[in-house]
DNA sequence: TTTAGGG
DNA sequence: CCCTAAA
């Protein structure tokens, strides 16, 4: 989270985050930031599903807030205009003329969004604070099968999309044909030969279904401040407010559907049957962009983009991200814990339900991992019902909700294999839980939990500190704690004994961590000697005599 | 259901 | 991580 906090220009943040992980996360994130930041207007920037709704602060007041609404109306056209320099931010992308204004037109054909919905979950995620605490959103995203989402959001780091037929005329291939067009032009929009404002008019007058938002060197006022989150805990209200305040019809927004913590987007392209439809091809990163090829062919053929998109996540990534699929510790066997296999045709990702607290997970691998350029399928959040869903054309992310085990049966997750680790099958053919290494941050959380609740209250710790980590069960916490104690013990031993040094087979943990464990071990003797369960950290004082390493197995 | 512990 | 007894 700190990640974003320190960023003044939100797109800059995007860049960096993208580089950090996946564009998808970024977008979602930006969206959040925007939403949270601005609780009364979309002014600063609004991005979702790769469609940006931005308004220049300089143009501000009247601007296209309507765009947002129209988006919900499933009509989107977006134009962006910004300083070229911005393209350079945070990446290896080279030259972008600093003072030139680039226009990016995002054109989403209406038809492609006909099925698009902006929906909110009724049962959503945790308060925003949770996002901050457990930034594991990516986990939820990776749950997607993004075979269908190719071109939906091209990871920013991906290489440039062929400009193909974009010759500055309206033959660019797709104004309204499919997907999105991000196009660069100087003072004019090459695609239409119109100025941006003209485009705007055009979009309004003639292409009512579309929206164009002008974008101009918007700066996100200040660093993202978590404190702002509290100001906007109701996204629905946020939307509604904007809608009404702008005197726009609320026709497109299903206010009732909007809930406090999330919005689901579903894009369902109807034109390219059975194809990966690029609802959006969004490339902010490449220096000059571009008209994103909109035809599915364009995307599918030999563009590095495609290849990348199809590539499976790395093993490690899978490890970290498979939570989403993981449900109940014991039942989750069927739903693979592996990352989505890029099965092209399998576009539907089941709607998995998860407890609220786990629904909006963000993972910013900030500590133990560096997942540069790892792509995450863009998540279009979709409601749990997954109804009216054209699996062949859309990607779908179901924002999980309440856990309903039986739903799992209907989950269409069809991950071909567990790339990650062939899981052993026991006699019953039940797969073992995938082994997940504990990250340092997880360990820290565990330690914090123990510090707060004391040893033995694993469920509480789980709820408080691992609410977003589906794969960590209270039992896991317990086991881990046990192992930590062991580790500290062994560490001490290795300090004193030479022999111990040879036993350093465990993963290195920061000394600080081990030290804390050690302290807590003293404060909270391992359950064996534990007494009072009900009070907080009861044993610290009640049975200090146990406080020594002897508790360690 | 949750914990503690053994494997 | 799994399994299970015990609470």
Image: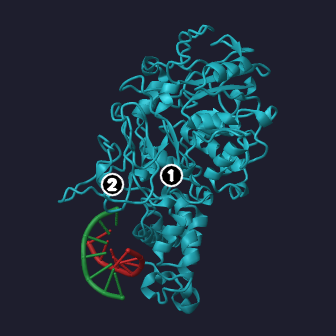
Chain colours: A cyan, B red, C green
Image mark for residue A121:
1
Q: In this view of the protein, can residue A96 be seen by the observer? A: no
Image mark for residue A381:
none
Asked if marks 1 and 2 touch (Cβ < 8 Å), the reply is no
Q: Secondary structure at mark 1?
A: loop
Q: In this view of the protein, can residue A218 be seen by the observer? A: yes
Q: Give the residue drawn at x 49%, y 89%.
A: A532
Q: Is residue A32 above or below residue A78?
A: below
Disc 2 designates what residue?
A407
Q: Is residue A438 above or below residue A288?
A: below
Image coords of residue A547 (percent x, y): 54, 85
Quarter holding residue A472: bottom left
Q: Give the residue drawn at x 48%, y 64%.
A: A501
Q: Residue A147 or A409: which is nearer the viewer?
A: A409
Q: Residue A299 or A241: which is nearer the viewer?
A: A241
Question: Of the residues tagged 1 and 2, which is closer to the observer?
Answer: 1
Q: Give the residue drawn at x 44%, y 26%.
A: A277
Image coords of residue A531 (percent x, y): 47, 90
Q: Residue A481 or A101: which is nearer the viewer?
A: A101
Q: Is residue A228 above or below residue A295?
A: below
Q: Give the residue drawn at x 60%, y 34%.
A: A70
Q: Is residue A522 above or below residue A56?
A: below
| Mark 1 or 2, nearer chain start | 1
Quarter holding residue A505: bottom left
């Amino acid at each position: 989270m700190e990640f974003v906090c320190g960023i003044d220009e939100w797109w800059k943040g995007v860049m960096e985050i993208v580089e950090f992980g996946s564009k998808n996360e970024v977008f979602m994130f930006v969206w959040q930031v925007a939403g949270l930041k601005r609780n009364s207007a979309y002014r600063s920037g609004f991005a979702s599903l790769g469609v940006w709704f931005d308004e220049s602060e300089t143009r501000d007041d009247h601007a296209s807030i309507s765009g947002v609404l129209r988006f919900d109306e499933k009509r989107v056209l977006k134009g962006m205009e910004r300083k070229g320099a911005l393209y350079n931010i945070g990446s290896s992308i080279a030259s972008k003329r600093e003072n030139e204004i680039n226009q990016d037109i995002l054109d989403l054909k209406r038809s492609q969004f006909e099925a698009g919905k902006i929906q909110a979950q009724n049962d959503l995620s945790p308060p925003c604070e949770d996002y901050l605490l457990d930034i594991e959103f990516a986990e939820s995203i990776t749950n997607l099968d993004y075979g269908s989402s190719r071109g939906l959001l091209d990871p920013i780091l991906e290489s440039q999309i062929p400009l193909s037929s974009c010759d500055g005329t309206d033959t660019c291939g797709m104004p309204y044909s499919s997907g999105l067009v991000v196009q660069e032009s100087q003072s004019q929009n090459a695609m239409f030969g119109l100025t941006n404002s003209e485009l705007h008019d055009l979009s309004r007058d003639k292409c009512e279904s579309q929206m164009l938002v002008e974008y101009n060197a918007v700066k996100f006022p200040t660093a993202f401040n978590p404190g702002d989150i509290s100001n906007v805990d109701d996204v629905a209200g946020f939307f509604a407010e904007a809608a009404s305040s702008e005197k726009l019809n609320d026709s497109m927004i299903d206010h009732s559907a909007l809930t406090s913590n999330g919005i689901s987007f579903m894009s369902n392209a109807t034109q390219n049957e059975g194809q990966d439809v690029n609802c959006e091809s969004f490339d902010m990163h490449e220096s000059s962009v571009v008209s994103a090829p909109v035809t599915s062919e364009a995307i599918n053929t030999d563009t590095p983009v495609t290849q990348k998109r199809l590539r499976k996540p790395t093993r490690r990534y899978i490890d970290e991200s498979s939570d989403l699929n993981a449900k109940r510790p014991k039942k989750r066997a069927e739903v693979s814990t592996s990352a989505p296999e890029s099965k092209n045709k399998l576009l539907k990702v089941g709607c998995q339900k998860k407890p609220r607290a786990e629904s909006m997970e963000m993972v910013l691998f900030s500590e133990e991992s560096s997942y540069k350029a790892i792509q995450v399928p863009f998540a279009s959040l979709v409601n749990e019902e997954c109804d009216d869903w054209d699996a062949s054309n859309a990607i779908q992310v179901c924002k999980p909700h309440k856990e309903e085990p039986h739903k799992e049966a209907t989950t269409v997750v069809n991950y071909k294999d567990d790339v990650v680790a062939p899981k052993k099958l026991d006699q019953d053919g039940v797969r073992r839980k995938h082994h997940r290494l504990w990250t340092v941050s997880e360990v820290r959380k565990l330690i914090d939990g123990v510090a707060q609740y004391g040893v033995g209250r694993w469920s509480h710790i789980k709820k408080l500190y691992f609410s977003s980590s589906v794969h960590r069960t209270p039992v896991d916490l317990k086991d881990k704690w046990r192992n930590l104690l062991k580790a500290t013990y062994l560490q001490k031993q290795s300090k004193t004994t030479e022999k111990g040094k040879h036993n350093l087979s465990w993963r290195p943990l920061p000394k600080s961590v081990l030290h804390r464990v050690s302290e807590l071990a003293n404060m909270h003797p391992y359950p064996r000697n534990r007494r009072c369960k009900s009070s907080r950290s009861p044993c610290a004082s009640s049975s200090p005599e146990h406080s020594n390493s002897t508790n360690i197995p």
